[in-house]
Image (cartoon, rainbow, N blue to C red):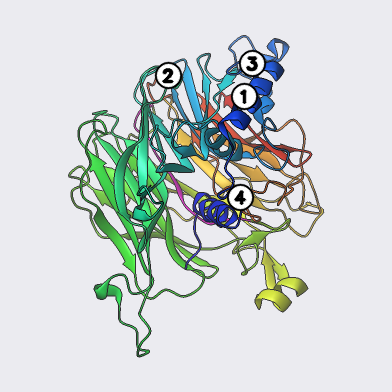
Amino acid sequence: MPRLSSGGANMFHIAKLLSDSSMLRAPLTAEGRAALQKELAKTHPRGQAVPSNEEEQTPEGHSRAPALVNDASLDYEFTRFSGFTQSETSSAWCGDSVVVGFNDSGAFVRSTVENVGGTSFTNVGVSHDRGRSFVGLPFLNPSSDPAVFLGGDPVLACTDAHHFVYASLFSQVDVDSEGNVTQALSGISVSRSQNGGTVWENPIPVVTKDANFHFLDKEWMAIDPRNSRNLYVTYTDFGAFGSDLECNDSTIPGIPGGPDVRVEIVLSKDGGNSWSQPLLLDRRCNLGLEQNLSGTQVAVGPQGEVYVAYAAIDQKRVEERIRRSDDGGDSFAPAVVVAQATTASSLGDFNLQGNFRTNAFPMLAVDSFGNAPRGTLYMTWTDATRNQIADLYANFIFGDPVYSFGEVVLSISRNGGKTWSIPKAVSPTPADFAGAGRDQFMAGVAVDAAGELAVCYSDRRNDPHNFAIDHYCSISTNGGSSFHDVRETPASWSPGHHMDVFINPGYMGDYDAVSSDITGSRAGFFNSFQIQTNTNPDVYGIRLKP
């Protein structure tokens, strides 16, 4: 099957571990669970805000150092082998409230051990002081239904300082009294908070399909800035081989065609209470290895126009596409090809140096307010076309003769997505860089109330050996014509993997998003991202001013 998102890969990794584990044959007893919770109560209080360093605050409250988002004291409360990986971040900022969602192996451990009903691989950090400090929750509420599992790939949105929406991968496996599976569903859900992210309602499935034939993955979500009751969710549906007769055109007798990969959208006109049937946006049949349609992004313009961007992947070659709707998502104009790109790394699993995966998915932002022309579209992604060097290992193992260094590029449309500018690097590699190249990856993009632009990403510019990682934001005050770079990490760090048993070995996440204050009351940006300390990943966030 074509490559899943990091959240999807982790879901299957966890399922495999549990299916092979004695955990299913000897679950934790009520007495054991009570003992663990008793010990937990001794060691640390839950839900405490992590204080910011007040000496490192400017008079305007702009943080010079990133704030810890997750509650790191929860990392090892039940086991030494898992529960300490927090990564793949999304954020939403409305007024004084900033909420960050992230994948969290500790959320899975805690929701399982504490027997809340469902289980959750996703979590939340909440700030009510505009990102200066955060309260890390134990896990995002999966509901009391033991059949429910929230699988990660978080996406956050908000309408005001109180109302937030959280999208996640969703699965439901119902069993009868004898333990036989009666229904298995794969889907996407949204969770809502009415108090700034502190308490979350039960998840609402927005789309589900038979998990025997479908896996829904890599979702994204947006809210209409003119009408907060209009919500949009996009995703990829990975159909099983031969699951759809329209896509079953195999030429080999007795072997079904497929798989069938679809990009789809569902929408709600009542704030997320009810959802439409899926609308097909793109489709590819009978895909081979390393072919894909994925990385959807949905954004809504100032007049309610809906944009959906995504990547069409064919091994290392990627086509960035976008479609537009002018009737609230009921129908879409034909796809426009924004650009062609080359995926960074080597062919095998798109792994970067250090053996973690990357992608060339687009990230999309629309100028829905501010001084720049309203409705301007900004799309960013990683492209490795310009710097490729011979690589013996990649050639020997994967049949790919080169290692490709990625750089973050930006393309702009000022006519509603009909035409796009030639992609340009937001922070090109200097001519005097000492190494063979440096990787940039996991880019995010946002526009603020003043019309300023931020493109934020992971970067290896401070290591000529292309191993240590930092996080940077490139800020533009002139609509993307020029940028100045801001380093967000206080020190470089090196990636470590396969330390956490519930994490896919090649995982470091597929994205780290950047947000602006959707209410328009403040300019600037909030960016969240992963930092590893001695191979222990945590989530940090920082508020930036242009």
Which callout, 4 or 3, points at the residue further toward the start of the chain? 3
The answer to the question of whether label 4 and label 3 lie on touching residues, with beta carbons closer than 8 A, is no
Circle 2: residue type: Gly
Q: Is residue 21 left or right of residue 42?
A: left
> Is residue 442 shown above or below 224?
below
Which callout, 2 or 1, points at the residue further toward the start of the chain? 1
Residue position marked by numbered label 2 in the rendering:
196
| Whether residue 391 is visible | no
Where residue 45 is drawn, which disc sits there? Answer: 3
Q: Residue at x 75, y 72 (%)?
A: 393
Give the percent coordinates (x, y) of residue 542. Answer: 60, 26
C-alpha separation, residue under disc 1 versus residue under disc 3: 12 Å
The picture quadrant where one finds residue 321 is: bottom left
C-alpha separation, residue under disc 4 versus residue under disc 3: 36 Å
Circle 4: residue type: Phe
Q: Which residues are magenta?
A: 357-370
Which callout, 2 or 4, points at the residue further toward the start of the chain? 2
The answer to the question of whether label 4 and label 1 lie on touching residues, with beta carbons closer than 8 A, is no
Residue position marked by numbered label 4 in the rendering:
441
